[in-house]
Image: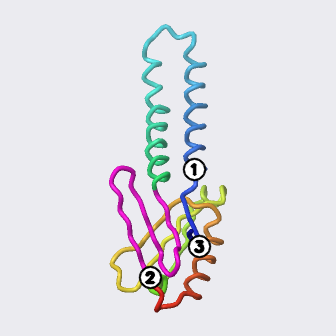
Amino acid sequence: MPDLRIRPSATLVIATYVTALVFAGGIAWLGKDAHSKVWMIAFLVPGSMILSAASRHLRSRFTILEVVGGRLKYETGMFGKTTRSIPLHKVQDVTVRQTFWQRLMGLGDLSIETAGETSRLTIQEIRAPRSVAEKLLDKVAHSDPTEQ
């Protein structure tokens, strides 16, 4: 059982779905009396919004960051899986980044930098990112370098 499990939130994805559906409804209402097929082209915008949101939704459903024992495990991928397993004592920096819209919705991106690693590990659009960062840093502070 993981000590800490972090998953991306679907809040912004759901907001995109709702916006696209409202936009499509507005197009349908405005074009209900039009006799031209040109109005159908306007549905490409909400359609592309829905496809983009669906792609982000699938990606987020198959992304997880867990603290298990003395290790940080990051797993992503639907058909092919990529897993990174990092000893907690190697975590050097935990950064929270929030856009304006993410701040309004209580979301943010969490980036983790480790000793000896070449890339940052980032999990996007998580709920309460500052709180999660504090919990993660607490786990790092109490980690045992001999525990693997």
Q: Residues within 10 Å of mark 2 (few under 14, many from 20)?
A: many
Q: Is residue 24 left or right of residue 117?
A: right
Residue 13, image x, y percentages: 55, 46
**Location of residue 131 in the rendering, given as x and y in whole percent from the top left corner:** 66, 72
Q: Earlier in the sequence, mark 2 or mark 1?
A: 1
Residue 19 x %, y %: 59, 37
Amino acid type of the residue that numbered disc 1 sits on in the rendered structure? Ala
Quarter of the figure with the C terminus: bottom left
Q: Nearer the viewer, mark 1 or mark 3?
A: 3
Q: Which residue is mark 2?
A: 87
Which residue corresponds to the image point at 60% horizontal and 37% vertical from the top-left?
A: 18
> Given the image, on which type of amino acid does mark 3 rest?
Asp
Q: Magenta stretch: residue 8 in it?
A: no
Image quarter of residue 80: bottom left
Whole-Å distance between the Cαs marked 2 and 3? 14 Å
Whole-angstrom CA distance, mark 1 to mark 3, is 22 Å
Going from the N terminus, do you reach mark 2 or mark 3 first? 3
The residue located at (46%, 48%) in the rendering is 56
48 or 85: which is nearer to us?
A: 85
Bounds of the magenta segment: 63-86
Distance between mark 2 and mark 1 Cα atoms: 28 Å
Q: Secondary structure at mark 3?
A: loop
Q: Residue at x 56, y 71 (%)?
A: 96
Residue type, mark 2 in image: Pro
**Residue that carries the numbered disc 1 in the rendered image:** 10
